[in-house]
Image (cartoon, helix red, strand yellow):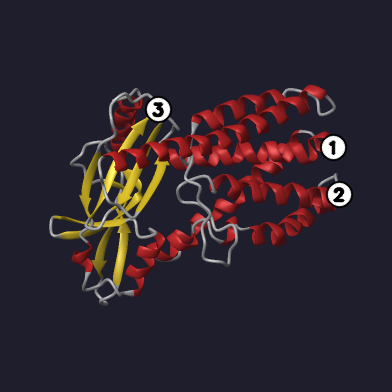
Amino acid sequence: MFVKNMDSLTQIVLGAAVGEAVLGKKIGNKAMLYGAIAGTIPDLDVLASNFTDTVTALEMHRGFTHSILFSIIFAPIFGWLVSKYQSYKDFKGWTLLFFWGFLTHPLLDAFTTWGTQLFWPLDYRVAFKSIFVIDPLYTLPFIVFLLLTMCKKRSSKKRSFYNKMGLILSTSYLMLTLILKWVTYTKFENALKEQHIAYSEIDTRPSPMNTVLWNANVNTKDSFLLGTYSLFDSQPITFESRPKNHELIEAIKENDKMQRMIHISKGWYSISVRENELFFNDLRFGLMSLDSEAEDFVFQYKIQINNNGLLQFSETKKGRDDAQKLMKELWTRIKGN
């Protein structure tokens, strides 16, 4: 819940800054308000989880509402609706505000691990995997400059300066995360080479709330290797082996829902057993612990067959204590090995 709230806050701040950039000089703080609304609307796709099954909801998340097509179609609609009851009647101006508010939302999401279907209806997610869904170094400076902007009159040059600085710094940080991803990817790649490990693919991403500690999943023939690297590390990178256990779902592997879950995970999944129950683990988002024996993956789904003989997936719940424990472990690991 905390992660989702912080993610929403980040999108609200970005949307508000974009709204200010488009119409701030003409309508003042109202531009921020409507920009914040525009920056929130794409995430209403999460409501799908209340009306459909887990697999379908996952497929829909960051789908149509996060596409360029959505921005093109719905920006004029919202622009027309708002221009009808606001004193500022410029349809074009309102349309541009909603267009950029809608579009910058998925553009930011594209830097995260889950990615976004920018080119929907094409079944392809743009995912640079260079920033966690929330990152204080991105959001907090942005908030400061947005507050400074709000305190100035709409005709003030400083108002425009503060808003531009917030957008420039946040965008620059996103570009920096791509550089850090390249640097850390190279570190993992070199470590695998030095340890003579044969692999077919590497998947890297930053750990929660920072871009200092990075995680890697490595695909080998019989298992996945998990590794971590901090920019402050002084010791060589080590990798922990995790069995794929794909044979445990051999009997249901061709089931439509199972195939869809495998597709959603991009093949980065393992199967685990606990108390005679099977669990589908999406490895792309890591574990809720740095313990080498941990099995509590961030995105873990219990595999069940219902009374009608249909395959179902239900996400395992994570508690606040789990998150607090993880953050303490991350803070210790960030400082180096």
Q: Which mark is residue 223?
A: none
Q: Position of residue 14 (x, y in %)?
A: 63, 38
Circle on res. 26: 1
- Assess disc 3: are there few (<14), some (14-19) or many (≥20) residues with their C-alpha within 10 Å of its C-alpha: some
**Among the two numbered marks 2 and 1 on one chain, the one whose residue lies closer to the N terminus:** 1
Q: Earlier in the sequence, mark 1 or mark 3?
A: 1
Give whichever of 221, 197 is nearer the camera.
197
Vertical placement of residue 249 versus 131, above or below: below
* The quarter of the displayed image where residue 310 is located: bottom left
Left or right for 261, reference 149: left
- Farthest residue to the bottom: give it: 308
Q: Is residue 221 left or right of residue 150?
A: left
Crowd band around label 2 with a 10 angstrom C-alpha radius: few (<14), some (14–19), many (20+): some
Numbered badge on residue 90: 2
Discs 2, 1 touching: Cβ within 8 Å: yes
Relative to 213, residue 98 above or below: below
Which label is found at residue 231? 3
Residue at the location (58% across, 44% down)? 108
Measure how far apart labels 1 and 3 are at the Cα level. 45 Å
Numbered disc in front, either 3 or 2:
3
Q: Tell me the kind of residue under disc 1.
A: Lys
Query: How far is disc 3 from disc 2 in space, using C-alphas?
Result: 50 Å
Quadrant into which the N terminus falls: top left
Quadrant, the C terminus: top left
